[in-house]
Amino acid sequence: MAGGGGSIPRVIRYLGNIARHPWQFLKLLWPLGKAASMSVLLVMQTDKNHLKLGYKKRWWRLGGCCMGDSAQTGVVSDKGELFNYPGLYVADGSVVSANLGVNLSLTITALSEHIMSKIPTKGDAL
């Protein structure tokens, strides 16, 4: 489905790149530590389009909606409610304040269940 074949077959170009850059090829085969150095974007669309990202590491970029004791230390409380926005909750992976280095599925599920248990039922006072 991908274009750009050119006059040299893709397999020949692939093997040529391995021969020219053997160290890079061997590094790609080592799976440990990949999550710390890459991002994966999955895009499904019917239109021909492109995505251009411009990101530079900055000391002030923290990202996410980290939990904190106050608006100065985080974005959401331990109940998942945004500071200064009563009734607005965040219950997903963005409340995790650091990269744990493992699969976050169970952590996100547990945090979401904890946040959902703290949301008042309909009719209760906020």
Image: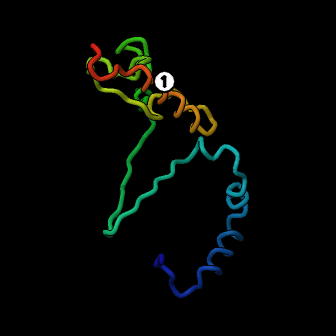
- Single out the residue that lies furthest toward the bottom: 7
Q: How is the structure coloured here? A: rainbow
Residue 5, image x and y in percent?
Answer: 51, 82
Residue 30, image x and y in percent?
Answer: 72, 52
Residue 85, image x and y in percent?
Answer: 26, 21
| In this picture, residue 54 sits left or right of residue 24 | left
Looking at the rendering, which quadrant does residue 124 occupy?
top left
Residue 23, image x and y in percent?
Answer: 72, 58
| In this picture, residue 38 sits left or right of residue 29 | left
Residue at 70%, 54% (x, y): give it.
Answer: 27
The answer to whether 52 is drawn above or below residue 91 in the figure is below
- Single out the residue that lies furthest toward the front: 123
Residue at 38%, 29% (x, y): give it.
Answer: 90
The answer to whether 84 is drawn above or below residue 58 in the figure is above
Q: How many marks?
A: 1
Residue bearing the label numbered 1: 114
Residue at 43%, 16% (x, y): give it.
Answer: 68
Residue at 60%, 44% (x, y): give it.
Answer: 35
Q: Badge 1: how crowded within 10 Å, few (<14), some, or many (20+)?
A: some
| Residue type at the position of mark 1 | His
| In this picture, residue 76 sits left or right of residue 111 | left
Which of these two is toward me, 77 or 75? 77
Which of these two is toward me, 59 or 29? 29
Looking at the rendering, which quadrant does residue 88 occupy?
top left
SS label for mark 1: helix
Which of these two is toward me, 126 or 33? 126
Q: Quadrant of the C terminus?
A: top left
